[in-house]
Image (spheres, coloured by chain):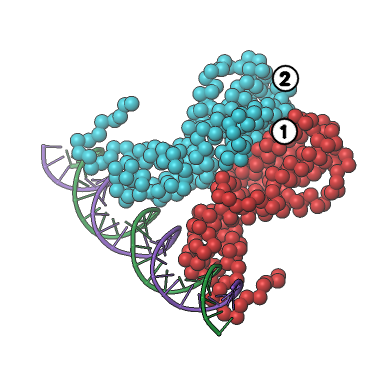
Chain colours: A cyan, B red, C purple, D green
Amino acid sequence: MLTLKKTSSDYHHGDLQSALISAGLREVEKHGLNSLGLRQLALDTGVSPAAVYKHFKDLDHLKACIAKASREILGSMMLKSLKQLPDVPKSKLDALKRLRATGSAYIDFGVQKKNLLEIAFISFDAPDLGPDSPNSYQIFLDCLIDLNKLGALSDSNLLIAPAVAWSAVHGFASLATHGIYGNKAEIEVLKDAVLSGIPRMIQIEL
Amino acid sequence: MLTLKKTSSDYHHGDLQSALISAGLREVEKHGLNSLGLRQLALDTGVSPAAVYKHFKDLDHLKACIAKASREILGSMMLKSLKQLPDVPKSKLDALKRLRATGSAYIDFGVQKKNLLEIAFISFDAPDLGPDSPNSYQIFLDCLIDLNKLGALSDSNLLIAPAVAWSAVHGFASLATHGIYGNKAEIEVLKDAVLSGIPRMIQIEL
DNA sequence: TCTTTAATGTTAACATTGTTTACATTAAAG
DNA sequence: CTTTAATGTAAACAATGTTAACATTAAAGA
């Protein structure tokens, strides 16, 4: 782990902005959104509560940044799952595998980091924060565009397929997160059913 | 509107428990989950803050009850949408129409009362509150059982179809709620696409 | 290099919140 | 009619988000 050299004195933190976001991510992941407090974050980063306001308008703004960061973690997990597959799909089946991989990663993110999924799409009507990078919706879309180019998805369906597929994946991840389905074995079975159902839902033609 | 006669003195409220839940529902629906405060609810119901603790363990408990109440509103909307259809479906198509009606009502609930959907499935890992009545999941399940009885859904699929269909509907409602899809016209198109995709997803055979 | 200025931190106070304790009032039971 | 349990109030507490006034340092300009 490489850290930037700070000044000799410890008066200035060096990179408080991202330190607060990281601390927030840890706190949310471990103890849930409810126990995310400004003063605790200040303590964690070794700084006074008022210092937070030099970098964020208020707690809601900080929360929105943490939410964005967790969406980006989700996006990285989706990208990571794609790196184990042929980068440029040559066949319809290859392209479909890529779509499924991204959906699987999305659900895994929800199951493994349920508290992050909880905050991820809160305050999505965000104030002026830039676009996510990576952006999970865009990753879905890219997979569907590949399927379209290979002739497995009609142009008209391409217009609605992203939202439809996203709904199924997000809904299952969200419901599983809320502890609605019992043991992990059951979740795995249902996850497979959802992922297998998506191609039929959006009318993929192999 | 019929109200129960209260005692002559106003010292005791009469039915503070449900009054607090109703006030909470109103507050959440109008101003969102974040601006739900114990003291404000006490003010709204004309009672001191400490009185709340005679009926609820703490604010989280009250929130869980409000969440349950909003899930039950969702359930009623689903039932209401069924009342405009033949009560006992005779054909596969009738049964399918009923399934679609419940899904449509679910999504409408999310779009029309986005803040209620936000709280509905928070704290679903609830403390000892009884079962919802009506229960939205059970309503889905009943429709799918009808489809199974009529031979439109295999026994094995019946085991997973409820969760799969629920995921698609809940996911779309949830995403639409977070303001991800632009205008209402677009939402309507996508809603139709999701609802039409569900029978294919769970392999309904007409 | 020296001075100035903007960025970034601290301390102390404030209003507000959820919660608890001790007590008051009323409804219900014996 | 008395007792008791249920249900309300008032006052205090610790903790939180937020702000204002001030301190320290880094960066920019002479």
Q: Is residue B37 left or right of residue C21?
A: right
* Horizontal and vertical percent position of residue A54: 33, 47
Q: Is residue B182 among what the camera can see?
A: no
Q: Quadrant of residue D30?
A: top left
Asked if marks 1 and 2 touch (Cβ < 8 Å), the reply is no
The residue that appears at 71% across and 37% down in the rendered structure is B162
Q: Is residue B189 above or below residue A90?
A: below
Name the quarter where the C terminus of chain A is drawn.
top right
Instruction: Using the image as rendered, state which of residue A28 and residue A206 is in the foreground.
Output: A28
Dot 1 falls on a residue whose secondary structure is helix
Chain where mark 1 sits:
B
Q: In the image, residue B28 lies at what x, y percent? A: 57, 57
Mark 1 is surrounded, within 10 Å at the Cα level, by few (under 14), some (14 to 19) or many (20 or more) other residues, namely some
> Is residue B163 toward the left or the right of residue C22 in the image?
right
Dot label at residue A206: 2
**Is residue D14 positioned above or below B9 on the image?**
above
Q: Is residue B88 something that shows in the picture?
A: yes
Amino acid under label 2?
A: Leu
Image location (x, y in percent) of residue B22: 61, 62
Q: Nearer the viewer, residue B139 or A107?
A: B139
* Residue for point 63% across, 14% down: A90
- Protein chain holding label 2: A
Residue B139 against residue A162 in the figure, above or below: below
Name the image quarter holding residue B204: top right
Residue B147 screen position, x and y as percent: 81, 37
Query: Is A55 located above or below residue B47 in the figure?
Result: above
Q: What label does residue A121 carry, if any? A: none
Say which of marks 1 and 2 sits in front. Answer: 1
Q: Residue at x 75, y 34 (%)?
A: B158
Q: Are marks 1 and 2 on the same chain?
A: no
Q: Which residue is mark 1?
A: B159
Label 2 element class: loop
